[in-house]
Image: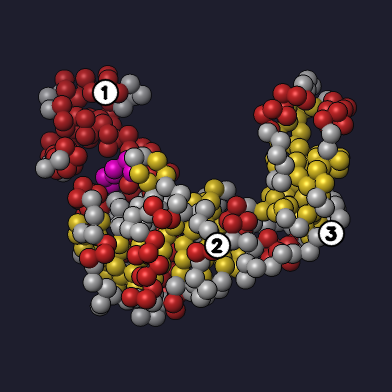
């Protein structure tokens, strides 16, 4: 048994529960002092170390899993790749709403985030992970959350799972190696060839992928969805076969809300128009899904430049898909002109946003040499291929 497996097994005992309680009470930012405190209470070093590690991971997991985090077990890589609870629940609800989807295979289940959501949505889950410790963690989490009757966890290679008898398959391939993210789909585990072949084995396939996935890899009849949570794009998902509803979807979730969706073809360029009163900065999910033109239609807005995802309109429209700014000045870019405009306004602190500009914000901030009580937001971009600086204020 590995050290990690031994540590997990120890924490599932009464002594382990006591160590976890002691670790939670001793956690004060000083790991050496906390370890000494646990040893002083008679906990063996390996149990104390495992309890302190889990206490730290549970604290980090609270943002993803809420109250569940305090009862779950984690591995470091498993926590980093795990689906956020709100995203997993939304995906599970969508799958459960499809007629005939009742039994799902969760390949590469990790610590069980999606399996838990599937079970809570009423699905029966067969979850597998190739790493023995990770599979043990997933099984423990299913049990601790009262879902062991709906989730069966096995340590197995995803390629060995027979899909006959399942209504759908979900796969979240390993996208971390040595604690670092893997961006090349060719380096995913299982391989991209295996992932791309899954829909031919079971049409109702969902693949969770990194948000930077190349559009060239999207199958012609699949739906590609990008999801952002509180402004950060966290994942892409390919929905295959009967699960695909639209070509592209951007899902935006903020806080505890149920989320908003923007859909479309993803192949429209959008109209270019003059600078108007309001600037819209589309969110990352909208940009990655190539749905800026669809958003422009909703906002009665146009692009500033055909290659840049900034929109402009006459009036501010409240939308979850973009931030809106009042445009106060439009300056053909020059350092001298921009510095003069900011100094005239008494600006000493500036927020710099950019799209389509090679300028480095920190370097520009130093070169502006500002000193004043006011704050301002500067947007560096191109307008009809020429560099501009827009002075804007948030709406």
Q: Secondary structure at mark 3?
A: loop
Residue furthest bottom as drawn:
99
Density class for disc 2 (Cα within 10 Å; few <14, some 14-19, many ≥20) is few
Q: How is the image coloured?
A: secondary structure
Q: Left or right: 354 with respect to 127?
A: right
- Residue at x 36%, y 70% (from the top left corner): 198
Secondary structure of the residue carrying tag 2 is helix
From the image, state whether disc 2 or disc 1 is nearer to you: 2
83 on left or right of 350? left
- On the question of residue 379 being in view, the answer is no
Q: Are marks 2 and 3 in contact (CB under 8 Å)?
A: no
Q: CA distance from mark 2 to mark 3?
A: 27 Å
Using a 10 Å C-alpha cutoff, classify the residue at mark 1 as few (fewer than 14 neighbours), some (14 to 19) or many (20 or more).
Answer: many
- Which residue is at 71% across, 36% downward? 359
Chief secondary structure of the magenta span?
loop
The image shows residue 31, relative to residue 58, as above or below, that is above
Residue at numbered disc 1: 34
Which badge, 2 or 3, is on the more N-terminal residue? 2
Looking at the rendering, the stretch of residues picked out in magenta corresponds to 71-77
**Residue 298: x percent and y percent?**
72, 65
Q: Position of residue 71 (x, y in %)?
A: 28, 46
- x and y, in percent, of residue 88 in the image: 41, 58
Q: Secondary structure at mark 1?
A: helix
Q: Disc 3 designates what residue?
A: 273
Q: Nearer the viewer, residue 322 or 4?
A: 4
Check residue 67 for magenta coloring: no
Lower position in the chain sequence, tag 1 or tag 3: 1
């Amino acid at each position: 048994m590995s050290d990690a497996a031994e540590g997990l097994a120890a924490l599932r005992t009464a002594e382990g529960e006591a160590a976890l309680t002691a670790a939670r009470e001793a956690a004060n930012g000083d790991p050496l002092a906390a370890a000494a405190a646990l040893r002083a209470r008679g906990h063996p070093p390996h149990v104390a170390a495992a309890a302190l590690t889990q206490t730290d991971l549970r604290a980090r997991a609270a943002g993803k899993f809420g109250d569940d985090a305090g009862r779950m077990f984690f591995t470091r890589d498993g926590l980093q790749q795990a689906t956020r609870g709100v995203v997993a629940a939304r995906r599970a609800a969508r799958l459960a709403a499809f007629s005939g989807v009742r039994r799902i295979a969760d390949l590469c289940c990790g610590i069980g985030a999606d399996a838990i959501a599937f079970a809570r949505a009423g699905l029966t889950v067969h979850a597998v992970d190739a790493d023995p410790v990770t599979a043990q963690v997933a099984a423990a989490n299913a049990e601790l959350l009262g879902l062991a009757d709906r989730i069966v966890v096995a340590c197995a290679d995803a390629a060995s799972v027979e899909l006959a008898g399942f209504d759908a398959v979900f796969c979240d391939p390993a996208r971390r190696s040595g604690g670092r993210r893997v961006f090349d789909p060719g380096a995913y585990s299982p391989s991209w060839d295996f992932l791309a072949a899954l829909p031919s084995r079971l049409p109702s396939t969902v693949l969770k992928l990194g948000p930077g996935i190349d559009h060239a890899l999207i199958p012609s009849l699949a739906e590609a969805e990008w999801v952002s949570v509180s402004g950060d794009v966290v994942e892409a998902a390919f929905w295959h076969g009967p699960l695909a509803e639209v070509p592209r979807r951007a899902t935006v979730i903020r806080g505890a809300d149920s989320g908003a969706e923007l859909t479309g073809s993803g192949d429209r360029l959008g109209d270019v128009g003059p600078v108007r009163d309001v600037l819209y900065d589309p969110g990352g999910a909208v940009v990655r899904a190539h749905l800026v033109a669809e958003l422009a239609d909703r906002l009665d807005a146009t692009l500033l430049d055909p290659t840049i995802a900034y929109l402009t309109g006459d009036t501010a429209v409240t939308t979850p898909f973009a931030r809106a700014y009042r445009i106060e000045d439009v300056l053909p870019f020059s350092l001298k002109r921009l510095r003069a405009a900011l100094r005239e306004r008494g600006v000493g602190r500036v927020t710099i946003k950019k799209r389509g500009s090679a300028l480095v914000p920190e370097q520009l901030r130093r070169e502006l040499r500002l000193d004043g009580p006011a704050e301002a937001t500067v947007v560096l971009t191109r307008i009809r291929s020429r560099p501009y600086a827009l002075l804007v204020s948030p709406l």
